[in-house]
């Protein structure tokens, strides 16, 4: 399984935060895929199961979701 693609741009100046306008840094959110891995759901569930799988795990069971992070206002913008 190939690695997840890098975030679209590594230039922080080219990626202002949509909430505060400060530069965002590109990187990856890492999730371990021991049970179900990173999933999207509209509501919390009792045992944290279900939802839509966002990305497939790599050979070691890790999931790398590319995106951007604003450390000023603590916003993550994920690209999957």
Image: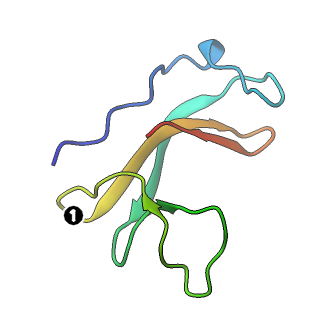
Identified at 59% across, 30% down, the residue is: 25
x, y percent for residue 22: 77, 24
Residue position marked by numbered label 1 in the rendering: 60
Q: Secondary structure at mark 1?
A: loop
x 43%, y 40%: residue = 80
Near mark 1 (Cα within 10 A), the count class, few <14, some 14-19 or many ≥20, is few
Residue 28 versus residue 58 in the image, above or below: above
Residue 7 vertical position relative to residue 55 in the rendered view, above or below: above
Residue 23 appears at what percent x and percent y? Answer: 70, 23
Residue 45 left/right relative to 54: right
In the image as oriented, which residue stretches furthest toward the top? 14
Total marks shown come to 1
Can you give x and y, in whole percent of width and height, for residue 69 in the image?
63, 38
Indicate the position of residue 18 as horizontal and vertical percent values.
Answer: 75, 26
Residue at left offset 45%, top offset 60%: 52
Find residue 2 and report its image quarter: top left
Q: Nearer the viewer, residue 14 or 79?
A: 79
Residue located 48% across and 21% down the image: 10
Describe residue 21's horizontal placement relative to residue 42 as left or right: right
Among the 4 quarters of the image, the one containing residue 3: top left
- The colour mode here is rainbow
Q: Nearer the viewer, residue 21 or 47?
A: 47
Q: Residue furthest bottom?
A: 46
């Amino acid at each position: 399984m190939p690695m997840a693609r890098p975030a679209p741009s590594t230039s922080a100046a080219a990626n202002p935060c949509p909430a505060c306008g400060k530069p965002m840094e590109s990187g990856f959110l890492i999730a371990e895929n021991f049970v179900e891995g990173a999933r999207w759901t509209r509501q919390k569930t009792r045992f944290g199961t279900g939802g839509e799988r966002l990305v497939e795990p790599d050979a070691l069971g890790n999931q790398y979701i590319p995106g951007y992070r604003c450390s000023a206002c603590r916003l993550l913008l994920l690209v999957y």
